[in-house]
Amino acid sequence: MFERGGLSLDRLRSITASLGAGDSLLHAWIIPRLPHELPACLTLASMHGAEVVARLLDARLDFGIARSTEVPDTLRTRRLGTITFALYVPRRLRPRRRTQTLARHDLPASKFDEVDLLATPARNVVFAWHGRIERQRPRVAALIDGLVAAFALR
């Protein structure tokens, strides 16, 4: 996965990079998908999408994962997929007077008959970086390819 242009895993390991994303993305999606043999020293940072973009723009962060709507055209991106966050709320905890319609999923009634689902709209997520990193560290292209492959939604 992490070989490109004849670069070996050992040569890629000399790369040190930082990756920023939201806390829920880091814990539920990024960390579980990190390859066992990571070909770089990768520092993970938890932050909001706007901060990810700001740090990418001023070179305090090498890579970031954010909603596509938050990333300006000045950054390079690769689409990772679409995600929807959901919150399951026991019916006994919701207000008696419902102010909004709650979405329902086709879930087994035996487990979820007392639960409503609140879901956010689906959001496109991208892997982003500033083009200057490729000029400063040419071997980074192989790292980008490998990380995008590891983090893409299947």
Image: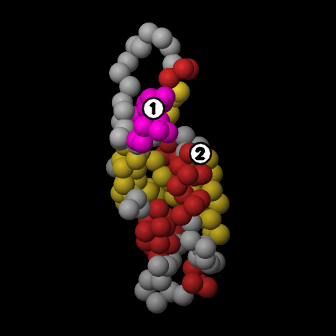
Crowdedness near tag 2: few (<14), some (14–19) or many (≥20) residues, C-alpha within 10 Å: some
The residue stretch that appears in magenta: 107-119
Q: Is residue 47 magenta?
A: no
Task: From the viewer's side, name the closer residue of 107 and 22.
Answer: 107
Q: Quadrant of the C terminus?
A: bottom left
- Number of the label disc, if any, that sits on residue 6: none
Numbered marks: total: 2
Residue 119 position (above or below residue 83): above
Q: Which residue is mark 2?
A: 23
Quarter residue 44 falls in: bottom right
Furthest residue in direction front, as rendered: 110
Q: Is residue 111 magenta?
A: yes
Q: Secondary structure at mark 1?
A: loop
Identified at 48% across, 30% down, the residue is 115
From the viewer's perspective, tell me whether residue 55 is left or right of residue 151: right
* Image location (x, y in percent) of residue 141: 45, 73
Does any portion of residue 112 appear in the rendered image? yes
Under mark 2, the amino acid is Asp
* Image location (x, y in percent) of residue 143: 50, 72
Identified at 42% across, 42% down, the residue is 108
